Image (tube, grey):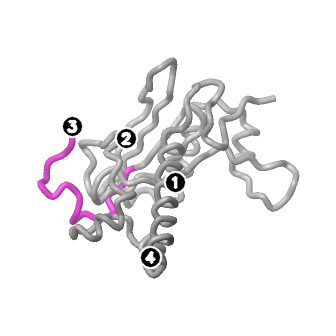
Amino acid sequence: MMERGSYTGDFHPISSRPCRAYTSGCSRLRAQASELAHVLATDPRQLARKINDSFKEPFPMESEDSRALQGTRLYSGFQICGTLKPNQKCFRLRRYNQGKYDELFHEHVPKHRISEDNARNFMKTLVARYREWNDFYILQSFLNERGKEPTSERPFQMPIEYPEPGVIRRYCCSGNVEAWMDEVIQPENFRPSGQGHE
């Protein structure tokens, strides 16, 4: 039987580490749930407003009030690409190996050259390659659940985060391998000084 990555983000037998994107996402969800519970207990009238805010564009606005409302959605600051430009998509891949991460892929392509669906499938392909899955298991990972044979598999976690103002990051993780794509979605908020990150 083939060794598979964790579906739940718990410790993987190869890496002995959970997917960072999964555990970060869980922490944010727990924080948001706790905040909603507090609002319900102290002022139920604000609950509808909080829920409505959860579905808005998750970038803090400039006022202090809006920052307080969206405090659980501050930018992660994790692995920011210093050379990302507004008209590009940045793809990265790394693998956890014996206490350290090896960066295996880092490329930029023009935004208009790859759709979001193709970008997602490309990341899945990268992860499958570096997880060294067999051909049939890769096929199973792309099947839908309309039917029993062959069985479908769900080895990928695909959370989203915001590493810096104006940028969205889409992850694709399985076990000790994680890929992500950064894309500028609010050019007016993206590094207004014009300086990149180190």
Q: Is residue 187 magenta?
A: yes
10 Å neighbourhood of mark 4: few (<14), some, or many (≥20)? few
Residue under the image location 52 percent in, 60 percent down: 33
Q: CA distance from mark 2 to mark 3?
A: 17 Å
* Residue 185's disc number: none
* Residue 107's disc number: 2
Q: Amino acid at mark 2?
A: Glu
- Residue underneath mark 4: 43
In the rendering, at what x and y percent does residue 48 appear?
A: 48, 79
Magenta part of the chain: 182-198
Which numbered mark, 2 or 3, is in the foreground of this view? 3
10 Å neighbourhood of mark 3: few (<14), some, or many (≥20)? few
Name the image quarter holding residue 17. top right
Magenta part, dominant SS: loop
Q: CA distance from mark 4 to mark 1?
A: 20 Å
- Residue underneath mark 1: 30
